[in-house]
Image: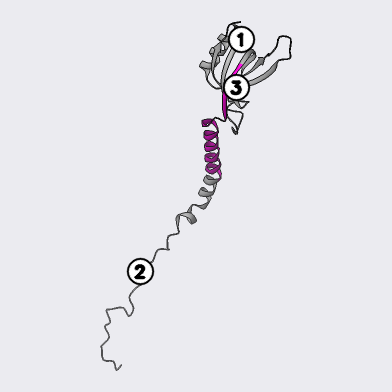
Amino acid sequence: MTSSQPEKPDAPATPAAAPTAAPRRGLLRRHWGKLTIASIVLVPALIFTGWAGIALSYSYSSGNRVGYVQKFSKKGWVCKTWEGELAMVNLPGAMSQIFTFSVRSDSVAGAIEEAMRKGRVELTYDQHIGVPTSCFGETQYFVTGVRSLPG
């Protein structure tokens, strides 16, 4: 051979290629199934929680109703709420108008039961429109206070 450099029998002709690792895929490509399932469950749960929180935090209207509590009971399979009816009579002998209401607090429910035994009651309520489920109460009207009236 006629080359300017002599061949070295000990050295390999080409250097051995180092084994290369496969390029790492991104987080979304590796966990797309888990992320899809999490978003299907978490996004609606967060929307529901926000909706319920806003609907129960802000009151559309508030006021008082006076009458006789004619029905009051704790209802529900999973979410137990107090539900009741207040019969409001304007004139003696006239048809009574029924006001249905919900109570979320056990202490207010106890006060209503106590006031029922004495006769006429005045209920203070807040109206919450758009509550997403009946788990919080079957009506829009949530009683927050009660007062027993004479007569």
Give above or below for 7 relative to 101. Answer: below
- Of circles 3 and 2, which is in front? 3
Circles 2 and 1 in contact, beta carbons < 8 Å: no
| Residue drawn at 55 percent across, 33 percent down | 55
| Residue drawn at 61 percent across, 29 percent down | 134
Left or right for 11, reference 30 = left
Quadrant of res 64: top right
**Earlier sequence position, callout 2 versus callout 1:** 2
Judged from the image, the secondary structure of the residue bearing numbered disc 1 is: loop
Is residue 87 a member of the stretch shown in magenta?
no
Callout 3, which amino acid? Ser
Callout 1, which amino acid? Arg
Q: Looking at the picture, how far across and down is residue 144, in whole percent?
A: 53, 20
* Local crowd size for mark 3, using a 10 Å CA cut-off: few (<14), some (14–19), many (≥20): many
Identify the residue position indicated by label 3 in the image. 102
Q: Nearer the viewer, residue 56 or 14?
A: 56
Callout 2, which amino acid? Ala
The figure's colour scheme reads one colour
Quadrant of res 143: top right
**Image quadrant where one finds the N terminus:** bottom left
Q: Which mark is residue 18?
A: 2
Q: Looking at the picture, how far across and down is residue 37, in whole percent?
A: 54, 46
Q: Looking at the picture, how far across and down is residue 3, in whole percent?
A: 28, 92
* Local crowd size for mark 2, using a 10 Å CA cut-off: few (<14), some (14–19), many (≥20): few
**Earlier sequence position, callout 1 versus callout 3:** 3
Is residue 44 a member of the stretch shown in magenta?
yes
Q: Looking at the picture, how far across and down is residue 113, in whole percent?
A: 57, 11
| Residue drawn at 27 percent across, 86 percent down | 7
Quadrant of res 91: top right
Give above or below for 21 relative to 151. Answer: below
Identify the residue position indicated by label 1 in the image. 120
Which residues are drawn in magenta? 40-65
